Amino acid sequence: MQLSKHFKLEEFTRSQIAARNGLSNTPGSGEVKNLENICYEILEPVRAKFAKPIMINSGYRSLEVNRKLGSSDSSQHTKGQAVDFEIAGIHNLKVAHWIKDNCDYDQLILEFYKPTEKNAGWIHVSYNEKGNNRKKVLTFDGKSYENGLPEMNYKYDKMGNEVIV
């Protein structure tokens, strides 16, 4: 099922945990609508800006899959309201800053961030219906959460490519 121009439902429901444990990871119509909202409000604009495919690490999770992961029953993933993703070759910090400045979102978390590694970790972003988004921004380094995102400092390499330091 196509959720938007560049995203299919299968990308959001693929789960090794579900496959290994014989668990269903099929969203209902409400969760599918929420996934469509994330696609149109966040992922499609991000893809247009960076002109590269987005790799979804985790999208929808059934309650059973979510519990196997050890995540909270209240996780927005179980409602189809959250997605974890990366873009190959684009610094996660740069993408997170762009989302913060250009999209409506509920939560934006730069997860497992390491300043010295271009694509360490991933971006977690969630979306509720318009008017119900908190615009909460966090950075998680694997040990603790901090409010906001690290600042971006740029320099240029010998080839003139922008490098975030």
Image (cartoon, rainbow, N blue to C red):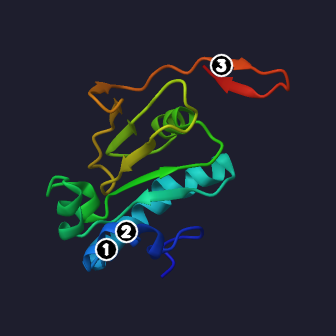
Foreground pick, 52 / 103: 52
Foreground pick, 22 / 77: 22
> For mark 1, does the 10 Å Cα neighbourhood hold few (<14), some (14 to 19), or many (20 or more) residues?
few
* For residue 105, side relative to residue 101 (left or right): left
- Residue sitting at x 21%, y 54%: 75
Extreme residue in the right direction: 159
Numbered tag placed on residue 154 in the rendering = 3
* For residue 149, side relative to residue 163 (left or right): left
Eye-nearest disc, 3 or 1: 1
Instruction: Report x, y in % for residue 98.
Output: 54, 37
Extreme residue in the left direction: 73
> For mark 2, does the 10 Å Cα neighbourhood hold few (<14), some (14 to 19), or many (20 or more) residues?
few
Foreground pick, 126 / 56: 56
- Residue sitting at x 60%, y 19%: 165
Amino acid type, label 1 = Arg
Amino acid type, label 3 = Tyr
* For residue 69, side relative to residue 6 (left or right): left
Residue pointed to by mark 2: 16
* For residue 15, side relative to residue 10 (left or right): left
**SS under mark 3:** strand
- Residue sitting at x 55%, y 30%: 117
Q: Earlier in the sequence, mark 3 or mark 1?
A: 1
Numbered tag placed on residue 20 in the rendering = 1
Q: Earlier in the sequence, mark 2 or mark 3?
A: 2
Q: Mark 2 near mark 1, Cβ–Cβ under 8 Å?
A: yes
Instruction: Report x, y in % for residue 52.
Output: 67, 53
Q: In whole angstroms, how far apart are the C-alphas of marks 2 and 3?
A: 37 Å
Instruction: Report x, y in % for residue 91.
Output: 59, 36
**For residue 23, which quarter of the picture?**
bottom left
**SS under mark 1:** helix
